[in-house]
Image: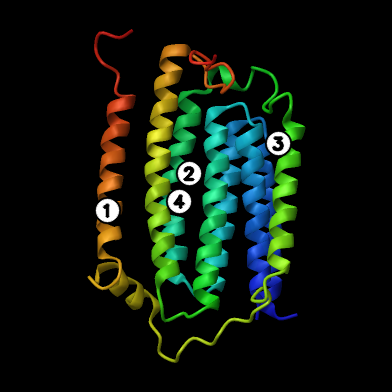
Amino acid sequence: MTAMQIIFLITAAVMLGSAFMVVTTKNLVHAALWLIVTLFGAAVLFATLNAGFIAVIQVVVYIGAIAILFIFAVMLTRRTMSETGAGLNPNWWLSAAIAVILFGGLAWLLRGWDGFSKAAPALPSGFDSVGALSQALVSPEAYVLPFEVASVLLLAALVGAVYIAFQKKGEE
Amino acid sequence: MIPLSWYLILSAALFSIGLFGVLARRNAVAILLGIELMLNAVNINLVSFWRYNDPTRMDGQVFAVIVFAVAAAEVAVGLALIISVYRRRNTVAADEIDLMKW
């Protein structure tokens, strides 16, 4: 068992435990904080996969922006929630059964796939994954169009979010 | 070195936990938290397939970046909708927002 494997196992245990807390804690501020732990675990996994840029934007975008947005939303809508009784549906066991069946099905499907326990190929020496990623994002032969469409989508979504959440003067 | 199977099993487990959160939670914000878990599981899968197939082709990482952008858009619109619903109906419990329920 190498050091990488030990790091992976610790990270995986932390991630699964905190993900479980995210979906079961009654206090939503705590759930959002547990989500941050899970997102940090994912950033560690991206680092073990030699995807340094993805690990950094996981911290900056997910933890720095999205998780904070969640905490804001929880605090803006908190008044009734923690007191309205159960955080879960009355028939939550059905959802648990669906989730377990999904996991079992995925594991069974993956076991039958022959690339399942593949080892990672060595990175070419001097390979610059950040440079290659940036070239792929702006090169016309690669992904410049999806990249621009994603930017327009983000802009449209933010304008839409401002419009939806904006309180007009006449309304209470 | 870590075999690919570990990453795939971890992300399958994470996706299932997120699905449980989406299906079982009553609070609309908590449902969005479950969706975030599922998107993260997808990202782990995409990046690990990038690493374990051909690292010189950047497709997996590019898709992960686009998933980041889509997740940010989804959270912004989703939370704006939830806040708007909260203003009008004073609740964010998904089973009490039943105006259009037949």
Mark 2 chain:
A
Q: Nearer the viewer, mark 1 or mark 4?
A: 1
Query: Circle 2 — which element?
Result: helix
Amino acid on which the number 2 mark rests in the picture: Ala
In this rendering, do the residues under marks 3 and 1 share a single chain?
A: yes
Amino acid on which the number 3 mark rests in the picture: Ser
Q: Quadrant of the rendered structure where residue A92 is?
A: top right
The disc, 1 or 2, on the residue closer to the chain's N-terminal end is 2
Q: Closest to the observer: A64 or A66?
A: A66
| Label number found at residue A149 | 1
Q: CA distance from mark 4 to mark 3?
A: 26 Å
Query: Circle 4 — which element?
Result: helix
Mark 4 chain:
A
Circle 4: is it few (<14), some (14-19), or many (20+) Cα within 10 Å? many
| Label number found at residue A67 | 2
| Label number found at residue A95 | 3
The disc, 2 or 3, on the residue closer to the chain's N-terminal end is 2
Circle 3: is it few (<14), some (14-19), or many (20+) Cα within 10 Å? many
Mark 1 chain:
A
